[in-house]
Image (cartoon, rainbow, N blue to C red):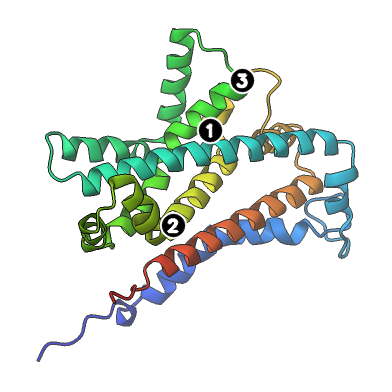
Amino acid sequence: MNRRFDIKHYQGFLAITCLCLFILYAPLIIVMIYSFNDSASITNWGGFSLRWYADVFTGPESEKFKLAAWNSLSIAVMAATVATTVATAGAIGMIRGGQFRGKSASFALISLPIMVPEIVTAVATLIFFSTIGFKLGTLSILVAHIVFCIPFAYLPISARLQGIEASYEEAAQDLYADRWRTFRYVLMPIMWPGILSGFLLAFIISLDDFIITNFIKGAGIETLPTAIFGSVKQGIKPNIMALSTLLLLFSIALVTLSYFIGKRGQEPHPTD
């Protein structure tokens, strides 16, 4: 008699899982707890307080953080928008384009930035920009973010498109709809959860990126992650913990929203 495979019943599985979760999330929880510490010390608890959250917005470094946050948000919005547009076109071409020479290689090229270590991408991007004489600054960050955000936007969009039957488009074309009208009125409304999910994923990847941005940002340009890193080099202060907690909560909210939008996109659609 075959017994159902259930990894949860294996000896030691629960202990290993709890250990992994502890290693992953304990540092984040500690940072969040000490961001509410009334004391200026990062090790001694001085009582509950929101003074460091107020310091983020009104303290001596508040203007630097506000400018860095604006840079991060504006770059992330533009990078995610362009990356999602390119990823949507790429997904339609790859999935609805039929078989063509180099299709497997094209898919590998799209997925490659996810598998390549980010430090390698950062160094290669810096060398490339230096070789062609591209001035480092906000524009260089935007271009780099667009490129490495495309694969992250492509994944949920292509997954959603693969779940859409081609019969919808065929029916629209049988009713004399051209390709643009078919995409606009048939395919796009069904694809939108995957597209929005891809946009949010690309946005959060761009917003949180540090390594590539730190290599190619140029002098005088800061994003929120690089501003946090610059402050940490001068010593870890409680206001950095508060700022890190805000960034973490914002990232968690976007990832959760992306998950539920993607999950909604997987719900079956009526065929009648």
Q: Is residue 113 above or below residue 199?
A: above
Residue at 48% across / 70% down in the picture?
18
Numbered disc 3: secondary structure: loop
Sequence-earlier tag: 3 or 2: 3
Residue at the image point whose x is 54% and y is 63% from the top = 256
Q: Quadrant of the N terminus?
A: bottom left
**Residue 225 visible in the snapshot:** no
Q: CA distance from mark 3 to mark 2?
A: 33 Å
Cα gap from disc 3 to disc 1, whole angstroms: 15 Å
Q: Give the labeled residue for mark 2.
A: 192
Mark 3 crowdedness (10 Å alpha carbons): few <14, some 14-19, many ≥20: some
The amino acid type, in three-letter code, at marker 3 is Gly
Q: Position of residue 37 (x, y in %)?
A: 83, 58
Residue 52 left/right relative to 148: right
* Closer to viewer: mark 3 or mark 1: 3
Residue with the mark numbered 3: 137
Vertical arrangement, residue 2 with respect to residue 242, above or below: below
